[in-house]
């Protein structure tokens, strides 16, 4: 069955890097998140792979980066992006990853969350594939109000895609089994960070 969102991103993939602004603070954000050498990281909704290449630079040759996206054309573009260390590409739906439980130390979801058809199910799946005390960061380079206004100005299936407020996102994370470490936003950043603790762990 056709997925309008997948079709939308596949169609735009060849020109995506010219359309979407790059985040000059990305390495700073990864450091703040605690990304370090040897980390096993899942980059959710990697798009054309720019975030995954930054993660690979952080985790080094001893780390492990899986760049996931549901749009195959986006991953074709991502494979063209030079990286310092190998990146493993995964074309899969975030709601059902072909990955063992407890596989990752960290998950980064940068500029992707509003496009999930079932946010609660996606968070449960991210919780499953994190190890004990593994961390998830949901990151955007603007506030949720700004992003939602931007999406509403677009044509196509993303027009109705919405990013929850930090307070609502916190409730979603807690319902999925995360403890919330930080939930803040400003005009130039949205940062909600959770950790998979021992109390809710079933992996």
Image (tube, rainbow, N blue to C red):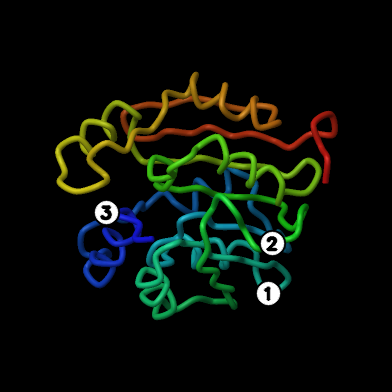
Q: Residue furthest top?
A: 167
Position of residue 175 relative to residue 10, above or below, is above
Q: Residue 70: horizontal and vertical position, in percent? A: 45, 61
Residue at point 65% right, 69% down? 60
Residue marked by disc 2? 99
- The quarter of the image holding the N terminus is bottom left
Circle 3 packing at 10 Å, graded few (<14), some (14-19), many (20+), is few
Residue marked by disc 3? 21
**Could you say whether the residue bearing mark 1 is in a helix, strand or loop?**
loop
Q: Is residue 140 left or right of residue 90?
A: left
**Could you say whether the residue bearing mark 3 is in a helix, strand or loop?**
loop
Camera-side residue of 118 and 36: 118
Q: Quadrant of residue 18?
A: bottom left
Residue at point 47% right, 24% down? 166
- Nearest to N terminus: mark 2 or mark 1: 1
Circle 1 packing at 10 Å, graded few (<14), some (14-19), many (20+), is some
**Could you say whether the residue bearing mark 2 is in a helix, strand or loop?**
loop
Mark nearest the camera among 2 and 3 is: 2
Mark nearest the camera among 2 and 1 is: 2
Residue at point 64% right, 40% down? 124
Residue marked by disc 1? 61
Separation of residues labelled 3 and 1 (CA atoms): 28 Å
| Residue 131 image label | none
Camera-side residue of 39 and 132: 132
Q: Quadrant of residue 56?
A: bottom right
Q: Is residue 8 left or right of residue 200?
A: left
Q: Residue furthest front?
A: 1
Separation of residues labelled 2 and 3 (CA atoms): 30 Å
- Nearest to N terminus: mark 3 or mark 1: 3
Separation of residues labelled 2 and 1 (CA atoms): 21 Å
């Amino acid at each position: 069955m056709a997925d309008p969102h997948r079709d939308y991103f596949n169609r735009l993939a060849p020109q995506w890097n010219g359309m979407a602004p790059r985040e000059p603070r990305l390495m700073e954000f990864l450091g703040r998140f605690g990304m370090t050498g040897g980390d096993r990281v899942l980059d959710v909704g990697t798009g054309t792979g720019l975030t995954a290449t930054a993660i690979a630079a952080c985790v080094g040759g001893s780390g492990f980066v899986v760049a996931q996206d549901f749009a195959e054309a986006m991953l074709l573009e991502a494979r063209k992006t030079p990286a310092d260390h190998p990146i493993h590409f995964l074309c899969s739906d975030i709601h059902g990853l072909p990955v063992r439980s407890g596989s990752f130390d960290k998950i980064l979801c940068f500029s992707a969350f509003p496009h999930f058809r079932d946010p609660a199910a996606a968070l449960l799946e991210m919780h499953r594939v994190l190890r004990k005390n593994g961390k998830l960061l949901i990151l955007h380079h603007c506030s949720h109000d700004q992003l939602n206004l931007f999406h509403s100005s677009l044509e196509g299936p993303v027009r109705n895609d919405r990013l929850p407020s930090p307070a609502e996102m916190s409730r979603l994370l807690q319902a999925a089994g995360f403890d919330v470490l930080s939930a803040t936003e400003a005009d130039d950043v949205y940062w909600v960070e959770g950790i998979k603790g021992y109390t809710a762990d079933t992996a």
